[in-house]
């Protein structure tokens, strides 16, 4: 029997495996702020341009006169990638149960190898989401682009003004970078607050009594991409919390393409994720005699990097 053929047919054990390997059906938001930049190296360098393109020059030239020259500042910045890996052992006893169940023609076949692999990938994805969220919710990274809401200014308050706040801070980003933000990342609780906010609903038809939709919010807030970050994590004390906390992140995120072909070194990117080509990937399963288990694993070499905090704005405690 090969690792790919290992299946779980025992209904009781199958229920236990499904409970242990159930994934949260959550919207992951990390790549919305930190798009993947594939690389073949674990350490690499990107050139960063200065602000020459946004400065005013006297470009008028008389016939025969020398042409104005501009020296571009080109500063290389080094980036590294971290390796993350996890193994999921499947005890030999489960395989023995499978063989006996098959002999007795017991139904409910569950691909145990797929459950193990999916669990490993889900763990690595959540780890990346948590790392990206910690980076994006650190107020020290935003070059002053932070607004802490409280009391009546919260978007969940009757007097909260999220439309005014988001549009005003969009202008702050534009003035600092020359780009209007195109992405807003919000947890589910913030989405609910925005959808029912009085200022938001004042932009809707008077005949509409229900909450605003995401498409309507995009138009009202003037942000083309709204990402709902639903992911949660569970502590060792079994306390469940939102990965992105009580925050909203507004940012300009360039479309760098699936292979990085659209990356422009002159764009004021909020950030990116250096990702080793081909990752995440599933390891070849192997049998461990010490634990008498098949070991299924996955590896993900990546690192989210915040490049320019001025290309983002952090709203703290919006609800």
Image (cartoon, grey):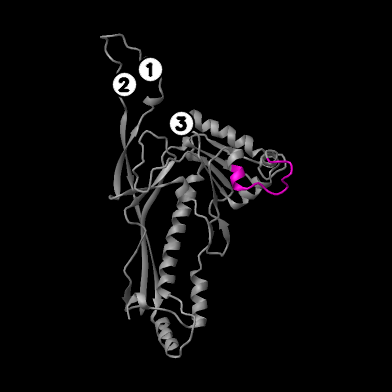
Please say whether residue 316 is visible from this viewpoint.
Answer: no
Q: Earlier in the sequence, mark 2 or mark 3?
A: 2
Residue at position x 38%, y 50% in the image: 303
Q: Is residue 194 left or right of residue 262?
A: right
Residue under the image location 57 percent in, 46 percent down:
247
Residue closest to the eye, 73 or 113: 113
Q: Where 156 falls versus 83 (above or below)?
A: above
- Residue 53 visible: yes
**Coordinates of residue 95 in the picture (x, y in percent):** 40, 82
Q: Magenta span has 276?
A: no
Q: Which residue is mark 3?
A: 177
Q: Earlier in the sequence, mark 3 or mark 1?
A: 1
Q: CA distance from mark 2 to mark 3?
A: 20 Å
Marks 2 and 1: CB-CB under 8 Å? yes
Image quadrant assignment for residue 285 = bottom left
Q: Is residue 64 left or right of residue 308?
A: left
Q: Are marks 3 and 1 in contact (CB under 8 Å)?
A: no
Check disc 3: other Cα within 10 Å, few if <14, some if 14-19, many if 20+.
many
State which tag comes first along the sequence, 2 or 1.
1
Label 2 environment density (alpha carbons within 10 Å; few <14, some 14–19, many ≥20): few
Q: Please give the name of the residue rendered at 49% of the width and 78% of the height, measured from the top-left corner.
A: 14
The range drawn in magenta is 204-217
Is the stretch drawn in magenta largely helix, strand or loop?
Answer: loop
Q: Return the mark for residue 57.
A: 1
**How far is mark 3 from mark 1, CA to CA?**
18 Å
Local SS, label 1: loop
* Residue 215 painted magenta: yes
The answer for how far apart the CA atoms under marks 2 and 1 are is 9 Å
Q: Which residue is denoted by mark 2 in the rendering?
A: 70
At a point 70% along the width and 49% down the height, the residue shown is: 210
Q: SS for tag 2?
A: loop
């Amino acid at each position: 029997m090969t690792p790919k053929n290992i299946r779980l047919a025992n209904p009781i054990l199958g229920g236990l495996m499904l409970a242990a390997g159930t994934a949260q059906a959550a919207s992951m938001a990390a790549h919305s702020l930190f798009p993947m930049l594939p690389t073949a190296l674990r350490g690499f360098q990107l050139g960063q341009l200065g602000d020459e393109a946004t400065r005013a020059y006297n470009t008028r030239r008389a016939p025969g006169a020398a042409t104005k020259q501009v020296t571009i500042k080109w500063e290389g910045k080094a980036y590294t990638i971290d390796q993350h890996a996890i193994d999921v052992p499947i005890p030999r006893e489960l395989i023995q149960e499978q063989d006996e169940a098959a002999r007795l023609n017991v139904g409910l076949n569950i691909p145990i190898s797929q459950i193990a692999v999916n669990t490993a990938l889900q763990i690595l994805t959540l780890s990346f989401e948590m790392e990206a969220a910690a980076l994006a919710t650190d107020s020290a990274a935003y070059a002053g682009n932070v607004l802490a809401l409280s009391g009546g200014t919260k978007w969940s308050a009757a007097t909260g003004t999220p439309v005014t706040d988001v549009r005003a801070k969009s202008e702050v980003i534009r003035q600092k970078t020359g780009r209007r933000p195109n992405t807003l990342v919000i947890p589910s609780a913030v989405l609910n607050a925005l959808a029912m906010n009085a200022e938001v609903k004042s932009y809707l038809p008077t005949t509409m009594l229900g909450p605003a939709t995401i498409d309507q919010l995009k138009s009202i807030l003037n942000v083309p991409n709204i990402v709902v970050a639903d992911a949660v994590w569970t502590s060792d004390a079994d306390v469940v919390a939102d990965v992105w906390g009580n925050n909203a992140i507004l940012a300009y995120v360039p479309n760098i393409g699936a292979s990085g072909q659209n990356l422009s070194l002159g764009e004021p990117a909020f950030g990116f994720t250096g990702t080793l080509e081909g990752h995440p990937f599933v390891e070849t399963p192997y049998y461990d005699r010490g634990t008498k288990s098949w070991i299924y694993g996955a590896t993900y070499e990546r690192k989210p990097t915040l490049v320019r905090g001025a290309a983002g704005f952090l709203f703290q405690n919006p609800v």
